[in-house]
Image: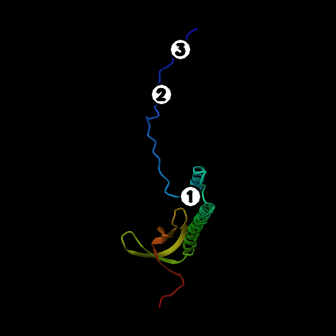
């Protein structure tokens, strides 16, 4: 019976690689709950945490979650308002400033929602909604 030799390998050292931890910059409900549970686990049994303090922390958690929900709703509402504003420009005379600083006016023909800011196509040029300087109804006359 032939025995094949085993190739020698070096075992990786646990100190060979350095792991980098990127700290979280936000305090979400999971982190808050972990802090509360850790605090409860490590409390002194002879002087437990005050129930009023625990209720206060739980209330703070609920308030934080509601503020996070309101922030998300506000962001979504703003995005919807930008889409509505961009859509209402189709067929209108729209003015913007080109990259050279020259004012340009043209008719808005389409809108794209692919980016974070809607873009309006004016005379074949895609222009970000936040760079548009004015809108005039096509049938409007100026005195």
Q: Which scheme is used to colour this image of the protein?
A: rainbow
Residue 76 image offset from top left, x and y in percent = 58, 67
Residue for badge 1? 28
Residue 24 image offset from top left, x and y in percent = 50, 54
Q: Earlier in the sequence, mark 3 or mark 1?
A: 3
Residue for badge 2? 11
| Residue drawn at (51%, 18%) of the image | 6
Near-viewer residue (140 or 128) = 128
Judging from the image, what secondary structure is the residue with disc 3 in?
A: loop
Residue 83 image offset from top left, x and y in percent = 56, 70
Near-viewer residue (125 or 88) = 88
Q: Earlier in the sequence, mark 3 or mark 2?
A: 3
Which quarter of the picture shows residue 36?
bottom right
Within 10 Å of disc 3 (Cα), the crowding (few <14, some 14-19, many 20+) is few
Within 10 Å of disc 1 (Cα), the crowding (few <14, some 14-19, many 20+) is few
Judging from the image, what secondary structure is the residue with disc 2 in?
A: loop
Q: Is residue 122 visible?
A: no
Q: Are marks 3 and 2 in contact (CB under 8 Å)?
A: no
**19 versus 29 height, above or below:** above
């Amino acid at each position: 019976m032939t025995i094949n030799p085993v190739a020698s390998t070096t075992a990786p050292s646990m100190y060979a690689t350095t792991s980098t931890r990127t700290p979280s910059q936000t305090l979400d409900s999971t982190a808050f709950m972990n802090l509360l549970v850790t605090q409860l686990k490590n409390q002194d049994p002879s002087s437990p945490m005050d129930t009023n303090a625990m209720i206060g922390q739980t209330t703070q958690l609920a308030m934080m979650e509601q503020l996070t929900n309101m922030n998300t709703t506000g962001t979504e509402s703003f995005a919807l308002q930008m889409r509505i504003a961009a859509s209402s420009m189709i067929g209108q005379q729209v003015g913007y400033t080109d990259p050279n600083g020259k004012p340009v006016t043209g008719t808005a023909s389409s809108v794209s929602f692919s980016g974070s800011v809607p873009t309006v196509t004016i005379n074949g040029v895609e222009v970000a909604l936040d760079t548009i300087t004015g809108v005039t109804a096509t049938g409007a006359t100026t005195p």
